[in-house]
Amino acid sequence: MISCRDLTRRFGDLAAVDRLTLEVARGTVCAFLGPNGAGKSTTIKMLSGLLAPSSGEATVCGLDVAKDRLAIKRKIGVLPENLGLFDDLTVEEHLLLTGQIHGLPAGVTLTRVERLLQALSLEQGRDTFASQCSHGMRKKTAFGMALLPNPEVLLLDEPFEAIDPVTSRIMHEVLVKAARRGTTVFLTSHILSVAERIANQFVIIRGGKMVWNSSAEELPRSLEELYLELAESPMTEELEWLGSERS
């Protein structure tokens, strides 16, 4: 469902994504991991047709990301880095608009909106304008918009950031069950425990280059240990003034 061959995006002399080659099969939950600035969001922008590759190629649902951008948008659900919400629309209005954009029958849209508002604990905030929502509410609204059209592929940039534990668990279950029914999920996350729990494919990227790609069964040790070895090691510098005697 997702295929990349030497996919590259340059910004001047910087290769934000450098010759990325990978395959993600139908019904897979793929965790695309790496430190800040590794190229994760840039990759999602290219796969969703928001950013043209500098070179290489990629297909989503068999469609070329450089040539079939509009057709791809009909088949995917995206939770982008900046969420893409309108300040003067309410939570509910965002969901209703998503159904209209995708051409869903009004009755189907209304039913799905109600289910999403309940599942994501947004029912009481349904009439809140996006400009007045907390970051968590905005994130849940954007997540609901990605799910509503029942896409073949979900591209999710940090879906669990700023989400409360209960809603996070609901989102986990939604994604895992959707994958079992054939939806392909491609997500970034800095919460390694969540990624390890729900994903069955792991890709680690560092400095724009892929440094790991395997199934969950092929992980040689815990995901955290592997990530710290391949992506970024924690700094051990001691801040000696913290906890010292105060004058």
Image (cartoon, rainbow, N blue to C red):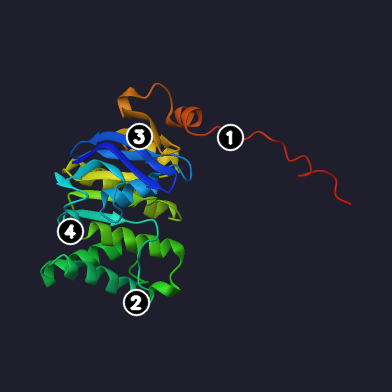
Sequence-wise, the earlier of marks 3 and 1 is 3
Mark 4, residue position: 70
CA gap between label 4 and label 1 equals 42 Å
CA gap between label 2 and label 3 equals 39 Å
Q: Amino acid at mark 2?
A: Asp
Q: Amino acid at mark 1?
A: Pro
Q: Amino acid at mark 4?
A: Leu
Classed neighbour count for the residue bearing mark 4: other residues with Cα under 10 Å, few (<14), some (14–19), many (≥20) = few
Mark 2, residue position: 127
What percent of the width, then of the height, locates residue 3?
A: 22, 38
The residue at the far front in this view is 13
What percent of the width, then of the height, locates residue 64?
A: 17, 47
Q: Amino acid at mark 3?
A: Val
Sequence-wise, the earlier of marks 2 and 4 is 4
Q: Nearer the viewer, mark 3 or mark 4?
A: 4
| Mark 3 element type | strand
Q: Nearer the viewer, mark 2 or mark 3?
A: 3
Classed neighbour count for the residue bearing mark 2: other residues with Cα under 10 Å, few (<14), some (14–19), many (≥20) = few
Q: Are marks 3 and 4 in contact (CB under 8 Å)?
A: no
Q: Is residue 12 left or right of residue 20?
A: right
Image quadrant in which you'd find residue 146: bottom left
Q: Which residue is drawn at the image coordinates 44% and 52% (left, top)?
A: 161
| Mark 1 element type | loop
* Total numbered labels: 4
Q: Is residue 21 visible?
A: yes
Q: Are marks 2 and 4 in contact (CB under 8 Å)?
A: no
Sequence-wise, the earlier of marks 3 and 4 is 4
Sequence-wise, the earlier of marks 4 and 1 is 4
Image mark for residue 203: 3
CA gap between label 2 and label 1 equals 43 Å
Mark 1, residue position: 234
